[in-house]
Image (spheres, rainbow, N blue to C red):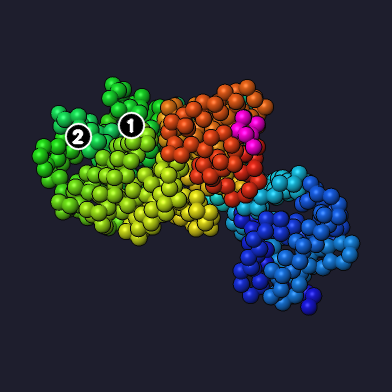
Amino acid sequence: MVGVVAVEITLFGDFGLKLATGQDIDLPGQKDRALLAFLALSPGTNHTRDKLANLLWCDRGDQQARDSLKHALTRVRHGLQASAASPIVADRRTVKLDPAAVKTDVATFERLLREGTPQSLHAAAALYRGEIIEDVSVRSPPFEDWLLLERRRLRHLLEAALTRAIADSIANGELGFAAEAARRLHLLDPLNEAASRAIMQAEAEAGQTVQALRRYQGLRDRLRAELGVKPAPETIRLYEAIRDRAAEEPVSAVSPVLPSTAEMPLPERPAVAVLPFENLSGDADQQYFSDGISEDIITELSRFRSLFVIARHSSFAFKGRPVKVQEIARELGVAYVVEGSFRRVGDRVRISAQLVDAGRGTQLWAEKYDRELVDIFAVQDDVARSVAAAVCGRVDVASRDRVERMSPDTLRAYDLVLRAKFLTLNYTRSENAQAREFAERAATLDPKSAAACTHAAWCLFYEYMAKWTRDSGASLQRAFDYAQRAVLLDETDSFAHTLLGIVHLFRREFDQAHTEILAGVALNPNDFLARRYYGMFLAATGNAESGIAQIELGRRLNPFDTRWVPWDMGIVCFTARRYQEAITALKQARNPINEVHGWLAASYAQAGLLQEARSTLEHFLRVAEQDMAVFPGRKLANWEPYWHGAFEYQDQADFDHLFDALRKAGLDD
């Protein structure tokens, strides 16, 4: 029945397909999705079968490619069999989609842009949820070339429309709409000066002078760093006008956001770093407890979505160093610093905490607590809420049920969890085993402790990855059980969701992994581990370039990290076939675990640096023979389970790419 819309296809962002009735259709094949997307972007156009076969199966012979196309069309038709009218029109020579039977978001997007009204532009921009078919990965040069050009075309259409809208709105005095269009354009192109000027002008008109000045400074620094140029004269003139106007205004009593004094650009949200609390107990053995309290305050503070909170690994880099707060703030790129001290005397704790406005060197808030040890959670929560209130003027943390007073067993369990966290910092086999023992004892003492279950799962997962056990499958299963239990105990714990997601990934349960890892990111956007594991998930499932962006965000949250970020970036760049960048990243890892040497050898090999690859592989094998519970020898086939445990690719082609590199580096067939 021609003329009736049968299916709706979503192309912006992830691929989506559903009947006109709203029923979702699962089309799992990557090339099946790619074929339907290609046809959907030119509905009504006849494409020869030879063209389509070469587009997606150029690595095969002519007849085999045509057969592959035939099978793909059969699968697509089967998926669409419940539709009111088949949108595929095909004969022996050509294939097309019936434009009357198909509705796509891209066609709607282009129609709205042609209308050219502020309302239609707003609607079109809302449809642009990302580049088209971001979740489809097909390694075929003709298809990749077409996809790149199509993505550029659609992006340029939106950029041009937004640029016109900004100019027209400013000319008509509609600064609100100009700023809205500019913010959308800024997301597409952070270096677009017209967008930055419109946002600066709107911020200045709204009395947000500091934000406008900071925006200019960030743009100026980025233009210099990335392009080696200065801002345009009109941008500089606008900045000077806003600056001069600000100099004539009286200074307000409270300014929650500071101009940037940092060498690292400040993020959009107020940025905070929590330094390790000084241990004044006179007992070095209590250092783990002091560090644990500081880390828990970081965790609680990072739940406030209005804040940007530096991760523990970077803020703790200043531990024991006589560095001024202003210098710390510059190095970390933050406006505010929390510092304090801890003293434990028997069953009582004395904690002092203060929030410092780093730009002015003034104290915004300070408090002293003299409490029983069982009240430690209440103290941590109070510090986090007070800091957030002082910086943001409000508290918008998601509600959480935290016990404010601990029983003796709960207190002992908490102590064991802190000891376990302290031990895992070095990531050695013996310390990981002891940390796992502490965490499992804590989970037994306090069955309601999500933190105990999460850390037990973490230790078991790491045991699985490093192959520190003869039965790695059992370790992964136990990690899964603990992670599931942790999520059930505290569904707002971002790390519990993230860890459950990464365990799902290594169980090859990719949909569940995606759901849990995204939940971790949503619950705590400041969680460094959630960001890094999201980046790793994207790389494992065929989207390495997007994975690199997530690792970069993790680097900003944890700028001093020299263990995780270089390791992760190396893996993701290797997966993206960016070998020199992978080598550079992996060589930056300090005191790396042995797996890093394996990835470095593989990267050298694929970069054609075979001498370096072979010497690095030999080092990897020597350490592995001493460290692993069962040493696989030199045969590549025996190493495959190890590399599945190191990184679980969804696509076998990515494993083949890795195994080919290790073969070049010196492993035997």
* Image side of residue 476 versus residue 570, left or right: left
Magenta residues (range): 663-669
Q: Is residue 335 visible?
A: no
Secondary structure beneath dot 1 equals helix
Front position in the image: 108 or 418: 418
Q: Position of residue 288 (x, y in %)?
A: 25, 36
> Pointer 1: residues within 10 angstroms few (<14), some, or many (20+)?
many
Q: Position of residue 620 (x, y in %)?
A: 51, 29
Seen as rendered, the residue at the extreme left is: 346
Residue displayed at 84% across by 50% down:
61
Residue displayed at 64% across by 61% down:
28
Front position in the image: 255 or 657: 657
**Residue 421 drawn above or below residue 220:** below
Q: Position of residue 656 (x, y in %)?
A: 64, 42
In the rendered structure, which disc, 2 or 1, sits on the residue that comes first in sequence? 2
Type of residue at label 1?
Answer: Phe
**Residue 173 drawn above or below residue 42:** above
* Image side of residue 272 versus residue 105, left or right: left
